[in-house]
Amino acid sequence: MATENTKCVIIGSGPAGYTAAIYASRANISPILYEGIQPGGQLTTTSEVENFPGYPEGVMGSQLMEDLRRQALRFGADIRNGIIKDVDFSERPFKVTADDNTVILADTVIVATGASARYLGLPDEQRFAGLGVSACATCDGFFYRGKTVAVVGGGDTACEESLYLSGLAKQVYLIVRKDFLRASKVMQKRVMDKENITVLFNTNTLGLFGEEFLEGAHLVEFAGTDKEHKFDINIDGFFLAIGHKPNTDIFRGKLELDDQGYIVLPGKSQATSVEGVFAAGDVADSHYQQAITAAGTGCRAALDAEHFLMEHQQ
Ligand SMILES: Cc1cc2nc3c(=O)[nH]c(=O)nc-3n(C[C@H](O)[C@H](O)[C@H](O)COP(=O)(O)OP(=O)(O)OC[C@H]3O[C@@H](n4cnc5c(N)ncnc54)[C@H](O)[C@@H]3O)c2cc1C
């Protein structure tokens, strides 16, 4: 079993992880970054990214991530293809174990493991991913100007996304499993008052259809009752708004997590509940979840780690 020592381990290779690696490398911290199961993170699953500053013509998600990776390599980051399977934050140096059983003793750790959007589990969701199915209205809504879309979910996020899309799309269907919205009263009113939003209560999605691109959804109202009614809607976009799952399983019991599993940042920095462990990106942010905010907090986490190392120099 190989054991190594380092000043900083970065876990994750999304915009947060790579940005942390750029800053930490330029500060001579020589970080080791583990890419995980999805090198490049969530943006590698999308096509064009139009809202990342610095790309006036837009950029393909995978190209953006390759650019960030090359920038981190340029300053000497040690980027490794592997998954961190265990961490021990009970004492410093922290013990981080990779899936090839390499053990790294690290003075600081930056957790940037992201969050994964929850899907309904329909086979067609993957088939139409990037071809009509999206889990991010802020990211992809612009592509549906003047079109018809559906949003799935009944909480605040689903209502917010429906309202956002109603400003772009011609028609928005909000597909709600229950006979009520879980969102706040104010949000509910806004949705119900919007002329181009139709709320489909007591409705589930059975499947999606289309040739190359998404063309519609098969729905069922009052499933399993004597009022059951199956019908189709024609849509160009299908937006999931049923939440995200932060990738924090290996940190459970080791870092403070909130009730949804996101890493808690108790102060004004990226410091977690364990001194010397920092978190950046979607894994510690259930609200903004954008590439630029992830990159911004990756920068902050690296600066925090640098200050921590200076303060704790032996
Ligand atoms: C389809 C889609 C389209 C999007 N479009 C846009 C857009 O247009 N604009 C925008 O700003 N945002 C967009 N987003 C949101 C954006 O992708 C995320 O906000 C951003 O990627 C979050 O970055 P992150 O670094 O926090 O984590 P992620 O990108 O989620 O990366 C997490 C990383 O952690 C790694 N990891 C996880 N567990 C481990 C482990 N145990 N060991 C090692 N590594 C691990 C993964 O392999 C991955 O590399 C989109 C998201 C999706 C899903």
Image (cartoon, rainbow, N blue to C red):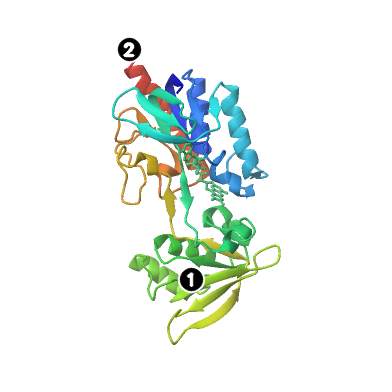
Q: Looking at this rendering, what residue extends furthest in the top direction?
A: 314
- Mark 1 surroundings: few (<14), some (14-19) or many (≥20) residues within 10 A: many
Closer to us: 42 or 120: 120
Mark 1 to mark 2 CA distance (whole Å): 58 Å
Asked if 221 appears above or below 1 in the picture, the reply is below
Q: Residue at x 60, y 68 (%)?
A: 208
Q: Quadrant of residue 297?
A: top left
Which residue is denoted by mark 2 in the rendering?
314
Is 98 or 67 nearer to us in this picture?
98
Task: Give the numbered dot on residue 197.
Answer: none
Q: Amino acid at mark 1?
A: Ile
Kind of residue at badge 2: Gln
- Residue 175, numbered label: 1
* Quadrant in the picture for residue 80: top right
Which is nearer the N-term, disc 1 or disc 2? 1
Mark 2, secondary structure of its residue = loop
Residue closer to the observer: 224 or 190: 224
- Is 309 displayed left or right of 25 in the figure? left
Q: Quadrant for the N terminus, please.
A: top left
Q: Residue at x 29, y 25 (%)?
A: 91
- Whether label 1 lies within 8 Å of ligand 1 gets the answer no
Q: Say whether residue 49 is left or right of residue 224.
A: right
- Where residue 116 appears, as percent x and y from the top left, is 48, 50
Q: What residue is drawn where x is 56% and y is 27%?
A: 72
Residue 157 pos. (x, y %):
43, 59
Dot 2, how many residues are within 10 Å of its Cα: few (below 14), some (14-19), or many (20+)? Answer: few
* Image height of 95 relative to 225, above or below: above
- Does residue 47 appear in this view? yes
